[in-house]
Image: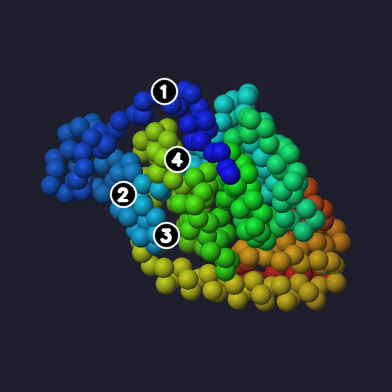
Amino acid sequence: MNNFNLQNIIRENVKAMKAYSSARDEYVSDGSKMIFLDANENPFENGVNRYPDPLQRSLKAVLAEQKNVSPNQILLGNGSDEVLDLLFRAFCEPKKDNIITLPPTYGMYTVLSNLNEIEERKVELNSDFQPNVEAILEAIDANSKMLFICSPNNPTGNLIASGKIKTLLDNFSGLVVIDEAYIDFSNQQSWISELNNYPNLIVTQTLSKAYGLAGIRLGLCYASAEIISILNKIKPPYNVNELTQKRALERVSNLEAVTNEVNAVLKERQILIEALKNISFVETIFPTEANFVLARVDDATKRYNQLLEKGIVIRNRTTQPLCENTLRFTVGIDAENEVLIKALKELD
């Protein structure tokens, strides 16, 4: 039985602090019939002369309906990196607490742990890129506040087995953060559906991948209303700007277009995988549920530089644990993939 207690996770200074109250927090209205003389803004209308909604209500309403959650279970951030940073700031005491990560995985967990002076305890994945649950549980102590699980994982592309995640949720009294940046390219259901079953579960997503909005920087966080209220307490008041909110609302309101693009990526992903099978210096193609393919080659640095000379930028992941001599290929549009495949054949 999990003995998770949110009050034991929150930093004491966060418990004691009072959130900044912006001008737009002090009324509940769409503002259409109000005269704003409260925030020292430029009064001349140009579409962005007013501060944005600090709680992004219109956007959250659509997301809540689509994800079958309450709007108060959603936090939006300036990219997923801000969301992750807020988690560190809310729940990890500098120079005291620690987090658990599962390399090879997303590198920002390490950057943010260093930035916030939080010890990072790394428990490498097994050779099949699945968690070593026993080793993870052994690494946990009373000061372990968060466990980060990227699924589908970056850079490997595979899903983390649901049974292993459930075991960790059941046995870790801290927060389990499941990073689902690539979930839209997978057939697996999001862990958002399990939020009501696990009070220590946090799910992060993004509009940068499947939704094609990397340039607007919008990260999504789903958790209990209690956890979200803590994050709202410490976030900057206007962290998501007006232009981002409007563009995101347009995109999430047109899921058919997103689905069509995802399907196109999945089709091109399979074409790329089939092509890689016929390249002699490609030794292993790892299973993927993301919009990229990880492959082991004879000499990753050599092949990376050769492709760079041909004007093709991929990712050399050879320095990551378990990823010696691997290259990560993001799936592009058909014309881009044709150029990549042609270049690989020329190097063969």
Label 2 environment density (alpha carbons within 10 Å; few <14, some 14–19, many ≥20) = some
Could you give the CA–CA distance between mark 3 and mark 2, rounded to whole angstroms? 15 Å
Could you give the CA–CA distance between mark 3 and mark 4, rounded to whole angstroms? 18 Å
Of badges 2 and 1, the one in the foreground is 1
Of badges 4 and 2, the one in the foreground is 4
Verify CB contact (< 8 Å) between mark 2 and mark 1.
no
> As displayed, is residue 255 above or below residue 220?
below
Which amino acid type corresponds to the residue marked 4 in the rendered image? Ile
Verify CB contact (< 8 Å) between mark 4 and mark 2.
no
In the image, taking residue 14 as reference, residue 102 lies left or right, namely right
Which amino acid type corresponds to the residue marked 1 in the rendered image? Ala
Mark 4 or 2, nearer chain start: 2
**Residue on which the image places disc 2:** 57
**Residue on which the image places disc 3:** 67
Mark 1 or 4, nearer chain start: 1
**Residue on which the image places disc 1:** 16
Quadrant in the rendering for residue 68: bottom left
**Element type at mark 1:** helix
Residue 55 versus residue 13: which sits nearer the camera?
13
Mark 3 or 4, nearer chain start: 3
Which amino acid type corresponds to the residue marked 3 in the rendered image? Lys
* Residue in view at x 58 percent, y 44 percent: 1
Which amino acid type corresponds to the residue marked 2 in the rendered image? Arg
Mark 1 or 3, nearer chain start: 1
Verify CB contact (< 8 Å) between mark 1 and mark 3.
no
Quadrant in the rendering for residue 142: top right
**Residue on which the image places disc 4:** 227
Residue 318 versus residue 88: which sits nearer the camera?
88
